[in-house]
């Protein structure tokens, strides 16, 4: 899968050279989307050379002879809609490809909306640097891949395959950073439901544990996840409680296809759970209900 990443950020070159370190990261086997070396593995370890920045970027016109000035200038180009200047920031072999992209014009307009770019992390990747950043104008994280060409830094294409375990596992680490789970607090639930009913479930979660994983006693994988105070089409449940630390979910009787007894398990975590084991059932909060 070919990705042309031409989004941008800023950081101090001195800070980068002093702080970039190689660390061994352990990802748990129950992390949704994790790529294990073997199906029976309980975890996977990867060595990542990176630095966490967590700072807002600067935006100003300057040269592109250092990482620092390159990103300052790139931000200025986006804000001021300098299309010709933007093309020059790419490697020569990529410049014509960028201009031919069907959504280039739309993406260029979108990038001009940047107001407060926030640099999250920088990772040494292959022969360049992979940056992860965000801005209040975007819902999702943005990335850029940069290589040093001669004496200047240029935006480069990054060819990633679905089989690249290191890349995808690295993404999961930078997205969630810590991997903890515990039993949530049950505030209110229901014991029976019919097709015509809509009933509420309220749960308390700890700070940072914004994922509420919901699974039945017969399931091998978590199929339902709710996020604290967050509404997205990617998640079927909407949190109806605006207060942080409390999740209120509405269940329809039609959520339960067959009549009879059900046992629901709830587990809060700092990351989305995937594959289930006896450990998850033992550590979860559970309650029973009857579909009439």
Image (cartoon, rainbow, N blue to C red):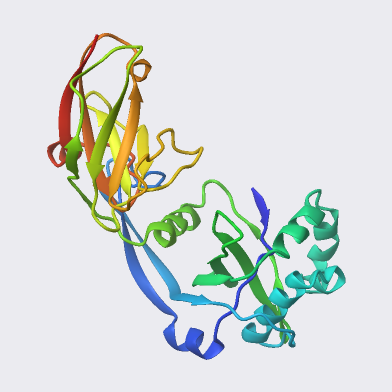
Vertical comparison of 76 with 252: above or below? below
Q: Is residue 244 left or right of residue 63?
A: left
Residue 287 at x, y percent in the picture: 16, 28
Pick out the residue farthest to the left.
Answer: 282
The residue positioned 20% from the left and 25% from the top of the image is 190
- On-image quarter of the C terminus: top left
> Which of 250 and 29 lies nearest the eye of the viewer?
250
Residue 254 at x, y percent in the picture: 37, 16
Vertical comparison of 115 with 211: above or below? below
Residue 147 at x, y percent in the picture: 65, 74
> Which of 137 and 1 lies nearest the eye of the viewer?
137
* Residue 135 in sight here: yes
Pick out the residue farthest to the bottom.
Answer: 14
Vertical comparison of 34 with 138: above or below? above
Vertical comparison of 221 with 83: above or below? above
> Which of 192 and 219 lies nearest the eye of the viewer?
192
Q: Quadrant of residue 80?
A: bottom right
Residue 87 at x, y percent in the picture: 82, 69
The residue positioned 52% from the left and 91% from the top of the image is 14
Q: Is residue 176 left or right of residue 86?
A: left
Badge count: 0
* Residue 123 in sight here: no
Q: Quadrant of residue 94?
A: bottom right
Q: Quadrant of residue 23?
A: bottom left
Q: Is residue 117 left or right of residue 2?
A: left
Q: Is residue 153 left or right of residue 285?
A: right
The residue positioned 23% from the left and 54% from the top of the image is 206
């Amino acid at each position: 899968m070919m990705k042309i990443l031409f989004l941008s950020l800023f950081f101090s070159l001195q800070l980068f050279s002093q702080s970039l370190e190689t660390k061994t990261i352990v990802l748990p086997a129950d992390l949704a989307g994790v790529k294990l070396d073997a199906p029976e593995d309980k975890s996977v370890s990867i060595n990542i050379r990176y630095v966490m920045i967590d700072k807002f970027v600067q935006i100003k016109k300057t040269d592109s002879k250092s990482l620092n000035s390159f990103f300052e200038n790139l931000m200025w180009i986006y804000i001021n809609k300098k299309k010709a200047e933007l093309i020059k920031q790419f490697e020569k072999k990529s410049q014509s490809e960028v201009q031919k992209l069907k959504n280039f014009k739309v993406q260029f307009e979108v990038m001009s909306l940047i107001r407060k770019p926030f640099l999250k992390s920088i990772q040494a990747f292959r022969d360049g640097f992979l940056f992860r950043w965000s801005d209040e104008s975007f819902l999702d994280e943005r990335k850029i891949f940069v290589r040093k060409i001669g004496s200047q830094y240029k935006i480069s294409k990054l060819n990633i395959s679905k089989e690249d375990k290191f890349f995808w596992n690295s993404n999961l680490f930078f997205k969630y950073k810590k991997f903890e789970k515990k039993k949530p607090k049950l505030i209110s639930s229901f014991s029976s439901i019919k097709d015509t009913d809509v009933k509420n479930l309220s749960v308390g979660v700890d700070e940072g544990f914004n994922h509420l994983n919901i699974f039945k006693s017969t399931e091998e994988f978590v199929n339902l996840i709710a996020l604290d105070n967050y509404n997205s089409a990617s998640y079927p449940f909407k949190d109806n409680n605006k207060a942080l630390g409390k999740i209120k979910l509405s269940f329809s009787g039609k959520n339960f296809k067959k009549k009879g007894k059900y046992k629901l398990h709830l587990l809060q975590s700092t990351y989305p759970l995937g594959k289930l084991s006896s450990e998850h059932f033992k550590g979860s909060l559970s309650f029973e209900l009857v579909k009439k």
